[in-house]
Amino acid sequence: MFREKMVTPAIPERVFTLCKIVEKRAISSSDLKAKMEPDYLKQTSSYYSDYRTAAEELQLITVSDNMISLAVDTSVIKTTASMRRYINGILSEFQNGQFYQVTKAYFEMDSNVLNGEKSLVALAPIMSKQLNRPVDAMAMRAWRFWVSYLGFGYLQDMFFIPNAAKFLEDIISMAGIEKGHRYSFGDFMAKIQPYSNIIISHDPSNRQLNYGVSNGLRTLHDAGIIKLEHILDQEDIWNLYPLKAHPISGTVTNITLCKEEV
């Protein structure tokens, strides 16, 4: 799912449920499959190997002698939100995988996503050409589940609106940013950079943030989680995607993580 081709059965809910089953003790693969896909459901197809592989790729579980154990602290899978934060913290390990590359390409399309295809399935040929690797309709269907869950935006039918607020909130909490301290925007970008390359170029020489990242920052500002400012006479000026209707309409120089918990 993350290292190779994206597959639709490996949805976040199944991965989370699998982890909760093995939370207290190791279990054989056959017993785990029986719990996830009991016979009384009379399923004609088994999806077990797909979501088990996803959990293994994410280093949530380990498999030894056909026994499956939880590989992380139980706090990681306390809630779906805690599992999301954990995954967002390790996405950089999957830079060669379809999920990472499609997400990066989608954000690089900037606001053009609003004018193009409104169905993710129809984007498959475009992604294939842009990435120079096969991306089919099934992969795009799988992508929508995880890109929504991990907080990169909002799904409306089969159209995905990029707004990375929740993802940015997660990586801000990992980046060692001090609450109440006003950072220059460049310093802030440097702190989140180990986690943010999936949606922000690691060398943004024009200091221009794309549509989906700008949406996310404004959403966090409006929620009181961060404070964006343009302070006169500051030289470290960054450009958000222009939005005249918002108080932070274009440029920013500073950012503060507010006192409330992220």
Image (spheres, rainbow, N blue to C red):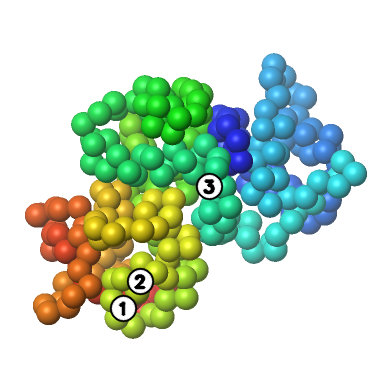
Q: From what the image shows, is residue 192 above or below residue 13?
A: below
Identify the residue under disc 2.
188
Query: Quick one: label 2 or label 1, which is nearer the N terminus?
Result: 1
Rounded to the nearest whole Å, what is the CA distance between mark 2 and mark 1?
6 Å
The spot of residue 162 in percent (x, y) is: 32, 44
Q: From what the image shows, is residue 86 above or below residue 55?
A: below
Rounded to the nearest whole Å, what is the CA distance between mark 3 and mark 2?
22 Å
- Viewed as shown, does residue 110 lie left or right of 127? left
On the rendered image, what quadrant is the C terminus found in? Answer: bottom left
Categorize mark 1 by other alpha carbons within 10 Å: few (<14), some (14-19), many (20+).
some
The spot of residue 72 in percent (x, y) is: 70, 59
Residue found 27% across the figure and 43% down from its top: 110
- Viewed as shown, does residue 247 lie left or right of 178? left
The spot of residue 174 in percent (x, y) is: 50, 68
Residue found 44% across the figure and 50% down from its top: 198
The amino acid beneath tag 1 is Tyr
Q: Secondary structure at mark 2?
A: helix
Identify the residue under disc 1.
183
Labels 3 and 2 touching (C-beta < 8 A) = no
Identify the residue under disc 3.
95
Query: Quick one: label 3 or label 1, which is nearer the N terminus?
Result: 3
